[in-house]
Amino acid sequence: MSVVSIHGKEYMTVAGRIDLFWKYAEEKKLAGSIETDYEIQDNQIYAKSIIQLVDLNGVVVRSATGHAHEIIGSSQINRTSAIENAETSAVGRALGMLNFNLPGLGVATADEIEIAKGKEEKLAKKKRSAAFTKAVKEINEAETVKFIADNRDAILATFPKDMKDKVKKAGYNDFSEVGLAYFAAEQDWSKALDLLGVK
């Protein structure tokens, strides 16, 4: 039934909730409606999903709204699919408000928990050194991160193989941070590793 276990707790996926929703509508002979709108402001996406069940007389018998917020480029998935990600989260929350879930499971979906876990891991990564922070101020960080995302393969091709393991062992799993150090160090990998504090 599209349920996954994360840190010992069970969560239902958005796909599982959507499936329950349409099955319920069919069983109760109701018309189902899932509508999602979004707006983009300063590289941020705000999604709003309204879900309704309407009877044969056109009366709305159940309705709920779900909201979601994503930042374009803030994660691997948000570099290419931030709108879709926000839409899925908003739909999942609205369905949770309507209790399309398994007994005992909360409003949060498995999809949301996985995303939140990724954000926590990103926040938990090493803090930038003073030298790194200073060097990054010399370049446009937002534009550079976007450039890195758009040209990831070409930049990776210049990355010395013997340095990859060192970077991973140091806890840098997000290449955008490593790439940022590379450009902050004037495209010198040795200097970039110094900025990252990688020995």
Image: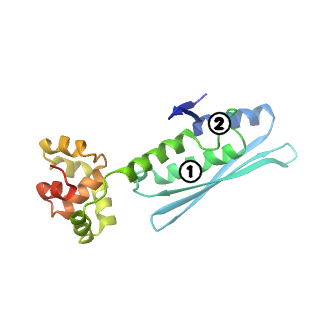
Local secondary structure at mark 2: loop
Q: Is residue 152 left or right of residue 5?
A: left
Q: Label 1 is placed on what type of residue?
A: Glu
How many residues crowd around disc 1 within 10 Å: few (fewer than 14), some, or many (20 or more)? many
Q: Compared to 136, does 29 lie above or below?
A: above
**Marks 1 and 2, the one that precedes in the sequence:** 1
* Spatial separation of the CA atoms under disc 1 and disc 2: 21 Å
Nearer to the camera, 51 or 176: 176
Location of mark 1 (residue): 87
Local secondary structure at mark 1: helix
Task: State whether residue 77 appears in this view.
Answer: no
Q: Is residue 37 left or right of residue 98?
A: left
Picture disc at residue 105: 2
Residue at 17 percent across and 47 percent down: it is: 157
Q: Label 2 is placed on what type of residue?
A: Leu
View extreme (top): residue: 1
Nearer to the camera, 188 or 28: 188
Q: Is residue 123 left or right of residue 185?
A: right
Residue at 85 percent across and 42 percent down: it is: 56
Q: Compared to 92, does 69 lie above or below?
A: below
Task: State whether residue 32 appears in this view.
Answer: yes
